[in-house]
Amino acid sequence: MSESRQFCPRCGDPVESGATVAATDGRAPICEDCYFENFDLVDAPDRIEVLVCATCGAIQRGKRWVDVDARDYTDVAIDEVAEALTIHVDAEEFEWRVEPEQVDETTVRMHCLLSASVHDRPIETRATVPVKIGHGTCTRCGRVAGEYYASTVQVRACGRTPTNHETERAIAIITEYVAEREADGDRDAFVTELDETADGVDAKLSTTQVGRAVADRIVRQLGGTVDESATLVTEDEDGDEVYRVTYAVHLPEFTPGDVIDPDDADPVLVRSVQGNLKGVHVTTGAPYEAAFEDGEAPDARRLGDRGDAEETTLVAVEDSRAVQVLDPETYEAKTIPRPDYLDSDADTVWVLKSRAGLHILPADDETAATDETD
Ligand SMILES: [Zn+2]
Ligand SMILES: [Zn+2]
């Protein structure tokens, strides 16, 4: 039996079968001595320059700015060196230690001790990488400082001014949404301006995405509709047109707690304006829902709201459809419709006096709890 002999293609030495290692470029296997002669455990850059945003501490990587959870520049330098080191594919159990040497205020020399096991042989090597820290301004901080905005959200109400509750909710929705985006690492989301005006709420926001999202959320919580309009403001460096988009939120004419008269006969206490308007007839207690095509704005006149109601004496229950109460203005006993939500044992009831007459409102505070929609 003839023993097959192999020779290292680089040095020509005979090699025992099985004692060769494949050259990483895919050529014929070479002997271990040749392999380790040219072996570099890591490929490290000669120096690293890091641009740090002086305002927020973000670091530029390529074209992007990224937030790093760094306490100081040494931390930043360690992170950047770790990012920049390329470890040989054959290395196993790779470990490294680093001793930062502060050279001056903006330069840290990183002395690295690197070790690994390569083909069961322990390898240890040292590398020194100087890291230079530069200061700049990231895109976000530059835009914030320049009061940049790409969308406007205007919150108004149809035929009235928004209530305090609506104004507070709109402001909270905007600030909470942007805070969520920021917490998710979205560096493009910020509020440039947020004002409460006599007409409602005006916000200038960093992107159209943020503008659209908060307008949709406001409508989902408070009802109403959104109109969108775009204005050409400039061209960007590539010659593309840049638009600023205005989202005009129109809150519904009526709000929960309003008493309205949709058909001039049977007043309704409004309970919800999300989707189409829903409420309860104050004459019978029967539920009311606006026709789908009327949505949240049925053709109706407003008679008043819960805040206008007054407590008065329940004089007598006449029958299943009528009760007697004292008119809160004249103190005359009056016979009025009896809604089924009336507690007939009560001594007093809440009534609303309007052009449509005197009506008993539900005693429960359901519609006054306007936070129910949150
Ligand atoms: Zn060899
Ligand atoms: Zn910044």
Image (cartoon, rainbow, N blue to C red):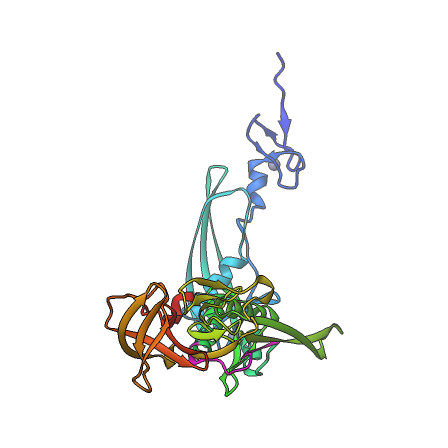
Furthest residue to the front?
318
Q: Is residue 165 above or below residue 284?
A: below
Quadrant location of the N terminus in the rendered image: top right
- In the figure, is residue 8 to the left or right of 50? right
On whether residue 162 falls in the magenta region, the answer is yes
In the image, residue 128 lies at what x, y percent?
49, 61
Farthest residue, direction top? 1
Residue at (50%, 88%) from the top-left corner? 198
Question: Which residue occupies 67% across, 75% down?
Answer: 229
User: Is residue 174 in view from this perspective?
Assistant: yes
Question: Where does the image place residue 99, in percent across and percent down from the top left?
Answer: 41, 62
Residue 187: % across, % down:
53, 69
In this view, the residue in front, 357 or 118, is: 357
Give the left or right position of residue 358, taking residue 36 as reference. left
- Magenta residues? 151-165
- Residue 89 is a magenta residue: no
Numbered disc total: 0
Residue 2 or 294: which is nearer the viewer?
Answer: 294
Residue 148 position (above or below residue 373): below
Q: Nearer the viewer, residue 28 or 72?
A: 72
Q: Residue 13, percent across and down?
A: 61, 32
- Residue 104 seen in the figure: no
- Give whichever of 59, 355 is nearer the camera: 355
Left or right: 204 as drawn, with respect to 125: right
Quarter of the image with the C terminus is: bottom left
